[in-house]
Amino acid sequence: MVDVRAEFLALYHRLQRLQKKRWTRRDRQNDRYMAHTARLFQASLIKRRKPTDKARTAWFLANQELVQALQAGYLWTWEAREVRMDRYKKHLEALLKARAKSVVRPEPGPWRVWKTVDSGCWRSQTDPINYARGEAENLADVPRKYSLEVQVRLTEEHDGGGRWSVPHGTFVVEVQGDEATVAALGYVPAPSLKEWLAACWRRGCNPRVYNPWLPHGLEERLGVDYFGNVREATRENTPCV
C-alpha cells in the first residue's frame, strides 16, 4: 500500500531540489557571461594599465552590439533550460495540490515555524506592527481551517531609537504537526475572499493595504461590513457596476 504522506514528502523535496538547482544554474550562467565580458575588457586594455570603472563603462558603451550578442547567447541557452524546468515545476505542483488535502490532519507533534511576517513591509502605515500581526493572523487562518493547532508569536520588537522612528516587529506562525502536514499547508485551498475580507476588518486592518487592487464596493457585493461581520448580500446593498 502506498503511503500518501511519504509520497507527498518525496514530491515536496523533489520540488525544493528543483528550485535550488534552478537558481544555482541561473547564477552560474550569469557568472559565465560576466567572466566572458571581463576577459574581453581585459584584452582591450593597454599593457600595465589599471582597469577602472570609467574605462569599463566606456568599453561597454563602445561595444554594445558585442555585449548584447553575448548576452543573447547566454540568455538563449538559459531560457531553453528554464522552459523545461518550469514545465516540470508545474507538474510537481499539480501533484502536490492533488494530494495536499489528504496529508493535512491534526495530530500531536512538535511546533514548526510555517511563516514569518516582518512589519518592515508596512512601514508607510501609522501602525505597521498591527498590519504585520494582521497578516500573520490571516496566514494562521489556513491551518485553523483544517483544525490544526496554531500560534502567532511576536519574536522581535523595537522602536528604532529615534523621535520619528517607526516601530518594528517580527511575527512567526507556528503549526503543531509533522513535516508533511506543515509542507502541505502551502498547497491546500485557503479561506475564501469573503472570509479574508471579514477577517481583515475584524482585526482592524484595511485589506486594501495588503491588496491595493481590490475594487471599490467589494465588501457590499460580498455582504461584509467594515467591522468584519458577514451577512447575506442582497440587491439593496449591492452597488451597480
Image (cartoon, grey):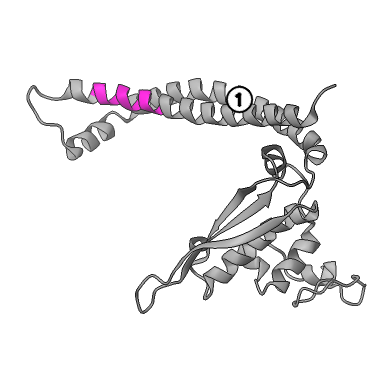
In the rendered image, is residue 211 in sight?
Answer: no
Q: Which amino acid does label 1 sit on?
A: Met
Identified at 7% across, 24% down, the residue is: 48
> Is 23 situated left or right of 200 in this image?
left
Q: Quadrant of residue 67?
A: top left
Q: In which quarter of the image is residue 196?
A: bottom right
Name the residue rendered at 69%, 45% in the picture: 109
- Mark 1: secondary structure: helix
Would you call the spot at circle 1 few (<14 residues within 10 Å), some (14-19), or many (20 or more)?
some
Q: What stretch is highlighted in magenta?
A: 30-40
Question: Which residue is found at the position 39% from the left and 73% from the top?
Answer: 165
- Specify the principal SS of the magenta part: helix
Rendered location of residue 149, percent (x, y)? 73, 54
In magenta segment, residue 234: no
Query: Which one is in front, 225 or 63?
Result: 225
The quarter of the picture where residue 97 lies is top right
Q: Where is residue 41 in the image (x, y as percent from the top left)?
A: 22, 25
Q: Is residue 34 magenta?
A: yes
- Left or right of 168? Residue 137 is right
Q: In this view, does 167 lie above or below 113?
A: below
Furthest residue in direction left, as rendered: 48
Q: In this orientation, which residue lies closer to the viewer: 46 or 1? A: 1
**Circle 1 is placed at which residue position?**
85
Q: Could you tell whether 170 is left or right of 165 in the image? A: right
Q: Where is residue 42 in the image (x, y as percent from the top left)?
A: 19, 24
